[in-house]
Amino acid sequence: MIKEMLSNEVLVVTTSNIAPLEISKYVKPISAHIVVGTNFFSDFLGGLTDVFGGKSATYQKKLAGLYNEAIVVLQNRAKEAGANCIVGLSIDVDEISGKGKSMFMITAIGTAVVIEKQKSATVSESERTYSSEFLSYDFIQTKIKEKQFLEKAEAGSLTFDDETWDFIISNKIEKMFPYIIAHYSDVIGNKSTMPEAFTKFDLNFQSFVNCLDEEKRHILIYQAIQANYSQNLKNYLVSVIKKLSLFNFKNVQDLLKSEDFKIQKIGLRVAICDKPFYNRSDIDEFQLLKMLIEKSFLPRGEISVKKQLLTSKEKEVWNCECGNKNNEICTSLNRVDRF
């Protein structure tokens, strides 16, 4: 059976072949692991009615969202490896525990391959959806609900409960991105005093970002860093880049080339984050990045010599362009805020 294509041009199948298409190259086995705390399903034991009905659909959606997230990770890794298809998909759910804590781990494995595509196999999901003369009832209801969510979000009246997050993530509603970070700006800025609210938001937000297509998630995250948001929010987005390995050469270069020195400093922080995979061509990219960093972070002051009091000895003083004089580089101008 062919799984839904969650990332452009990477087909995922559970079978070992994809007739009538032919496999021209077997690249390598790949895997993805998604770990969630048991509190993700904490409501499940709230009552027996949840097991036999009632809220069962909610848990099915949560599981489906985690499955899709694992598949998206596999697809991105297949693209990094130069493959355009994954065969033999297998997904397992295991419970892991230690030091009195338990978590669920979803493991997805498959084999990355290269297939010779036919024109009929390259039709996008949207083309398949709208080329039909008929639209399903579920599809129409989903689009209506999406429109209602966006209208409420714009008006500031949308409640971000579990149902809302499940719908946003499972349907990959990228247009919700600015409304989400605006709604949770206080939680992000006060994470030390609102730890539970922040932790819950952080898990949902990472799942949301991870479900989006690779190119789209890069665009949204990096554009938000350059937008007129608070420093706390920008710091949080840097932490998301680090956790999800969203390093991207072009986007980091754009940050370093910014006329805003604060944005340049963020670019320097992102430059030490990771990609999911590396290849030989990355060596040249890193060399270019190194040259850009050296060019962007020139000395922002000068060193002068000053005599010390009650002694003939002299000492070097850093005269910063901001007006401060220090024994070392000015901390007020060159400090890099950390999240």
Image (cartoon, rainbow, N blue to C red):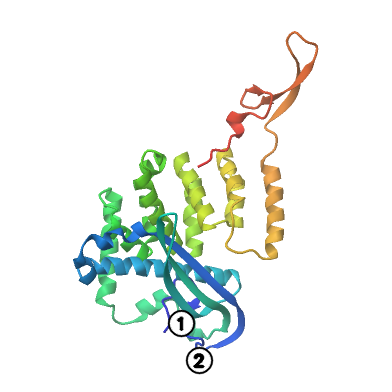
Residue pushed farthest top? 310
Rendered location of residue 188, percent (x, y): 40, 43
Q: Is residue 189 visible?
A: yes
Q: Is residue 194 above or below residue 288?
A: above
* Residue 135 placement, left or right of 71: left
Disc 1 marks a residue whose amino acid type is Thr
Disc 2 marks a residue whose amino acid type is Pro
Foreground: disc 2 or disc 1 = 1
Name the quadrant containing residue 228: top left
Q: Is residue 171 visible?
A: no
Rate crowding at label 2 as few (under 14), some (14 to 19) or many (20 or more) other CA atoms within 10 Å: few
Rate crowding at label 1 as few (under 14), some (14 to 19) or many (20 or more) other CA atoms within 10 Å: some
Rendered location of residue 147, percent (x, y): 28, 61
Q: Is residue 75 above or below residue 336?
A: below
Residue at (50%, 87%) from the top-left corner?
18
Question: In front here: 171 or 86?
Answer: 86
Task: Name the residue beneath numbered marker 2.
Answer: 20
* Residue 27 placement, left or right of 101: right
Rendered location of residue 206, percent (x, y): 43, 56
Secondary structure found at label 2: loop
Name the quadrant containing residue 191: top left
Residue at (50%, 74%) from the top-left corner?
109
Q: Point out the image quarter for the N terminus.
A: bottom left
Task: Name the residue beneath numbered marker 1.
Answer: 14
